[in-house]
Image (spheres, grey):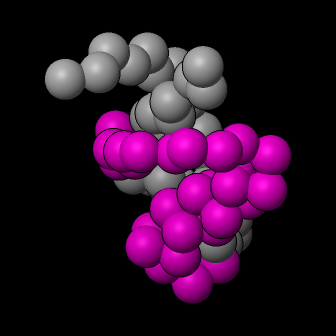
Amino acid sequence: MSESVYKVIELVGTSDKSWEEAAKNAVETASKSLKNMRIAEVIKLDLKVEDGKVSAYRARMSLSFKYES
């Protein structure tokens, strides 16, 4: 079995449609500059409210990626 090292970072994705879209946006944006991403875990979901209406969905998540040797 080979040994691996992973880094865990925190991301916040946003969307005006859904929490799922917010999480997807965060992962897809991170994938443009990170390689070997492994696991994304949603930590917290919240909403942005303006004038009594939901204006954005936010997904806070931890994302791990593997260090290259």
User: Residue at (80%, 46%) from the top-left corner?
Assistant: 33
Q: Quadrant of the C terminus?
A: top right
Q: Residue furthest front?
A: 1
Q: Is residue 36 above or below residue 64?
A: below
User: Residue at (54%, 69%) from the top-left corner?
Assistant: 24
The magenta segment: 16-43
User: Residue at (32%, 15%) from the top-left corner?
Assistant: 3
Front-most of residues 8 and 53: 8
Q: Is residue 36 left or right of residue 25?
A: left
Q: Position of residue 61 (x, y in %)?
A: 45, 41
Q: Is residue 1 left or right of residue 58?
A: left
Front-most of residues 20 and 63: 63
Q: Position of residue 65 (x, y in %)?
A: 52, 34
Q: Is residue 36 above or below residue 9?
A: below
Q: Position of residue 48 (x, y in %)?
A: 60, 58
Quadrant of the rendered image containing residue 15: bottom right
Q: Residue furthest right?
A: 33
